[in-house]
């Protein structure tokens, strides 16, 4: 295991030094990152990076620091940096989280902070996994409004009570933290997974939608909702606080009662 380090006095740009001058006190952390580059080697390597950082910074800031100052080959996804795009889900200290929503100070930074890719999806490079199976399951549940004509002249009206029925599941940002924390999904990757079911729920319980029966049949499949073992990993992992397991239970109930 190699240990690139960054001395505060050396290797800093003026801009970063200026930013840090306005920051709180710095602590030195060790970030232990699982590295894998199939173009170089078939083996996985854990690499320790030591550097000073304000503990109020986020894991995403620490990863940027590594990439911009210590090792430009480190590869990870991120876009919005504010918990909206869902692209930086990763396992941080063994738990699925968004790097941009996780503060260093909340991670027991006296010990090495481990960062690795989410599980159950093929690792392409470093912290990047192949999201295609995840998005295919999402597409399979038809995550769009289905109506059979009767175009309204203005908007399709809905009561506040009816809107409330699927409010929670509208918050999904498709980060895959839930699906990749699910032991059933790890086992064979065939299970639709919690995120696809959450997004099916969002339309099944929408009073304006007329594709509920179709979606329920899709999820009645052997790889559908009945594979869920109610372990609550998904609910614990969701950075949006969605009650994922409850949504899955509601879809199961709708399948039995055919009422939604
Ligand atoms: S339900 Fe939560 S954890 Fe799952 S994909 Fe959506 S936002 Fe991410
Ligand atoms: S970078 Fe967009 S959610 Fe974290």
Image (cartoon, rainbow, N blue to C red):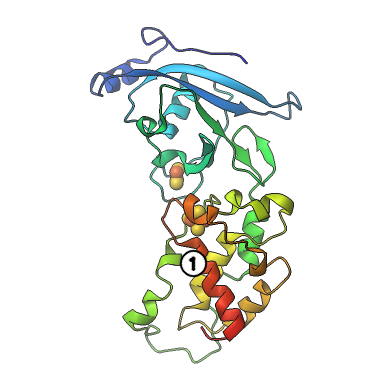
* Res 88 seen here: no
In the depicted structure, whether residue 38 falls above or below residue 129: above
Q: Quadrant of the N terminus?
A: top right
In the depicted structure, whether residue 182 falls above or below residue 154: above
- Position of 118 compared to 80: left or right? right
Q: Is mark 1 within 8 Å of ligand 1?
A: no
| Quadrant in the rendering for residue 71 | top right
Residue under the image location 57 percent in, 85 percent down: 257
* Res 129 seen here: yes
- Label 1 sits on a secondary structure element that is helix
Residue under the image location 66 percent in, 69 percent down: 226
State the image coordinates of residue 116 (x, y, percent, origin top left).
58, 34
State the image coordinates of residue 170 (x, y, percent, origin top left).
44, 66
Q: Which residue is situated farthest in the left direction here? A: 22
Residue toward you, 43 or 109: 109
Residue toward you, 249 or 24: 249
> In this figure, what is the number of numbered marks?
1
Q: Which residue is situated farthest in the right direction here? A: 42
Q: Quadrant of ligand 2?
A: top left
Question: Which residue is under mark 1?
Answer: 246
State the image coordinates of residue 127 (x, y, percent, origin top left).
59, 35
Q: Which residue is situated farthest in the bottom direction here? A: 150
State the image coordinates of residue 231 (x, y, percent, origin top left).
57, 57
In the depicted structure, whether residue 102 falls above or below residue 229: above
Q: Quick one: label 1, few (<14), some, or many (20+) residues within 10 Å?
A: some
């Amino acid at each position: 295991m190699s240990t690139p380090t960054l001395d505060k006095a050396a290797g800093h740009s003026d801009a970063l030094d200026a930013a840090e001058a306005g920051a709180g006190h710095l602590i030195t952390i060790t970030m232990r990152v699982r590295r894998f580059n199939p173009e170089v080697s078939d083996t996985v390597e854990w690499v320790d990076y030591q550097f000073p950082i304000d503990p109020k910074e986020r894991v995403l800031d620490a990863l940027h620091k590594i990439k911009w100052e210590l090792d430009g080959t480190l590869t990870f996804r991120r876009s919005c940096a504010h918990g909206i795009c869902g692209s930086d889900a990763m396992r941080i200290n063994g738990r699925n989280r968004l790097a941009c929503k996780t503060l260093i100070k909340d991670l027991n930074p006296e010990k090495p902070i481990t960062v690795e890719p989410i599980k159950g999806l093929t690792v392409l490079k470093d912290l990047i996994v192949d999201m295609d199976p995840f998005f295919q399951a999402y597409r399979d549940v038809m995550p769009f409004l289905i109506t059979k004509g009767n175009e309204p002249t203005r908007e399709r009206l809905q009561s506040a009570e009816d809107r409330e029925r699927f409010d929670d599941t509208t918050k999904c940002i498709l980060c895959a933290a839930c699906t990749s924390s699910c032991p059933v999904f790890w086992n064979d990757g065939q299970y639709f997974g919690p995120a696809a079911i959450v997004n099916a729920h969002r339309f099944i319980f929408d009073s304006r939608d007329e594709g509920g029966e179709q979606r329920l049949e899709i999820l009645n499949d052997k790889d559908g909702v009945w594979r869920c073992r109610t372990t609550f990993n998904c609910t614990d992992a969701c950075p949006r606080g969605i009650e994922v397991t409850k949504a899955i239970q509601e879809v199961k109930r709708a399948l039995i009662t055919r009422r939604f």
